[in-house]
């Protein structure tokens, strides 16, 4: 049988061809960014909702589901660094428009300028 599917999906890559030929090789030795548990996804979403509000969090996850796999322990630190430069509302709007920014490390976010 095919392996269990990831809670975030496989981004369209099938495990086998329509005739049953295996397409993907199992790679048990290397963890992928998207290999997260439902509990990790829930924890990340709850952190997003706490920092950015329920509506923005939902919008971000719909636009870029992979953001649930980012390190949620860094979300607050990164937000704080950008808030010093841009203000809270502008930071929340900026990240909501581009959820990929959630992957930025706090030390890199601290280098941001508004010019």
Image (tube, rainbow, N blue to C red):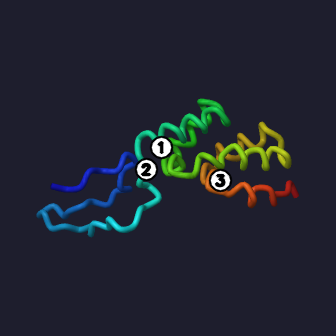
Q: Are marks 1 and 2 in contact (CB under 8 Å)?
A: yes
Local SS, label 2: loop
Q: Which residue is mark 3?
A: 101
The x, y position of residue 2, in whole percent, is 20, 56
The x, y position of residue 16, in whole percent, is 20, 62
Which residue sits at x=72%, y=54%? 106
Figure quadrant of residue 112: bottom right
Local SS, label 3: helix
87 vs 66: above or below = above
The tag on residue 36 is 2
Which residue sits at x=56%, y=34%? 46
Which residue sits at x=49%, y=47%? 65
The x, y position of residue 59, in whole percent, is 56, 38
Of the two numbered discs 3 and 1 in the rendering, the one whose residue sits closer to the viewer: 1
Local SS, label 1: helix
- Does residue 114 appear to the left or right of 17 in the view shown? right
Q: Which residue is mark 1?
A: 40
Q: Earlier in the sequence, mark 2 or mark 3?
A: 2
């Amino acid at each position: 049988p095919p392996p269990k599917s990831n809670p975030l999906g496989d981004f369209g890559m099938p495990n086998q061809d329509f005739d049953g030929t295996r397409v993907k090789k199992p790679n048990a030795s290397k963890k992928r960014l998207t290999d997260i548990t439902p509990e990790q996804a829930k924890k990340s979403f709850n952190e997003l909702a706490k920092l950015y509000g329920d509506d923005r969090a939902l919008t971000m996850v719909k636009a870029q589901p992979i953001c649930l796999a980012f390190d949620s322990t860094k979300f607050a630190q990164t937000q704080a660094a950008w808030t010093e430069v841009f203000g809270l509302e502008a930071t929340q709007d900026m990240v909501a428009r581009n959820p990929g920014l959630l992957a930025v490390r706090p030390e890199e976010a601290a280098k941001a300028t508004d010019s």
